[in-house]
Amino acid sequence: MHHTPLRHPALFYRDAEEYLAGTVPFVLDGLAEDEPVAVAAPPSNLELIAADLGALAGSVRFIDMTEAGRNPGRILPGVLLAFANEHAGRVRIIGEPIWPGRTAQEYPACLQHEALINLAFRDRAATILCPYDSARLTTSVLADARATHPLLVDSAGYRPSHSYAPERVLAVCNQPLPAAPDAVTLRFEAGGLSAVRHFAMDHAQRLGLAPDRLDDLALAVAELSANSVVHGTGGGVLRLWREHGQVVCEASDGGRIGDPLAGRRPVPPRQVGGRGLLMVNQVADLVRTYVGEDGTTIRAYLWSGGTR
């Protein structure tokens, strides 16, 4: 097992009683040690913890994970690292990114996020507890949790995970994406980025994207196409289509992203550049990436009826 300042256990719980038994003492221990504490979970679980804490709930940051973590790519920069960066010293966080109701389409990005926590916090003093509903999640999801967490905890206590293998999980998550169905396609180069945005906006409207999401799409397309030009091979291919109530935009190019945390780190306010993929994660409801020998493909999904 790798020994780092990070403690990253997975909590397996079967009901509300076990959830509270695993989370509330964790919060109270943090408060007793004067550690800043945040809880990012679905609303029903936030309510359970807050009610059990009573007056002490005012000392905890509560975050609706179904909103802040709707796109799993937002959780590291917008929740976990953002909270850690606000404080000196060790922080304590409950983060529940995988819950019953997550779609099969979202799950690979959730799994990737859990594996990346170990890399993002490798040199950070943090304790991040990730609850898993063992009564309602599948056995394969629970097996994945054992692979992404070096520690496991349930009603019997803490123990090391002998299945811990985050690098293997990241490799499994980096698989070719399914073929795009009936996509409209545009090849672009450095001088045509304005045309790319107009092309995307026009077709997104035809595909039924809500007017209040068009600016999000324009920003995602602008950042993806600019990245292809600057960091790829001077151009790329943009594809758009509609899929399961979402409008999907995809950019592919001959470049290869070498940093698995690209787009998942907060950027200092005065830093010039470096916000492209971060902004795509911010505006999209889901982002999937595949890096292969021939280049990189990035897909951004936006709910076509407005914010999900």
Image (spheres, rainbow, N blue to C red):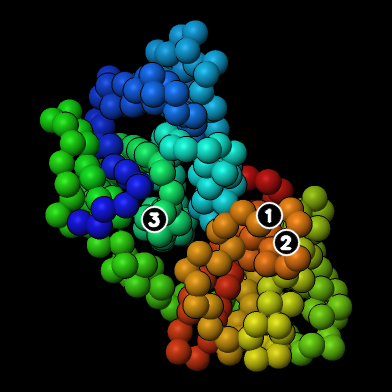
How packed mark 3 is, by other alpha carbons closer than 10 Å (few <14, some 14-19, many 20 or more), is some
Cβ–Cβ under 8 Å for marks 3 and 2? no
Residue 278 point in image, percent of width and height: 64, 60
> In this rendering, would 55 be left or right of 161?
right
> In the rendered view, does 231 fall on the left or right side of 222?
left
Pick the front one: 302 or 283: 283
Residue 134 percent coordinates (x, y): 25, 38
Residue 255: name its quadrant.
bottom right
Tell me which amino acid carries mark 1: Pro
Front-most of residues 53 and 30: 30
Q: Do the residues labelled 2 and 1 touch (CB within 8 Å)?
A: yes
Vertical order, 163 against 180 (above or below)? above
Question: Which SS class for mark 2?
Answer: loop
Query: Any mark on residue 122, and which?
Result: 3
- What distance separates the C-alpha of mark 3 from that of mark 1? 20 Å
In the rendered view, tell whether residue 143 sits above or below residue 253: above
Mark 2 and mark 1: span between their CA atoms?
5 Å
Q: At x 43% / y 37%, what residue is drawn?
A: 90
Disc ID at residue 271:
2
Determine the residue positioned at 65% across, 82% down.
231
Q: Is residue 69 above or below residue 194?
A: above
Spatial separation of the CA atoms under disc 3 and disc 2: 23 Å
| Number of residues whose C-alpha sits closer than 10 Å to that of mark 1, classed few (under 14), some (14–19) or many (20 or more) | few
Image location of residue 295, percent across then percent down: 53, 86
Callouts 3 and 1 close, C-beta under 8 Å: no
Amino acid marked by disc 3? Arg
Of marks 3 and 2, which one's residue comes earlier in the chain? 3
Indicate the quadrant where residue 170 lies.
Answer: bottom left
Does residue 301 appear anywhere in the picture? no
Which of the two labelled residues, at mark 3 and mark 1, occupies the earlier sequence position?
Answer: 3
Q: Write down the residue under mark 1.
A: 268
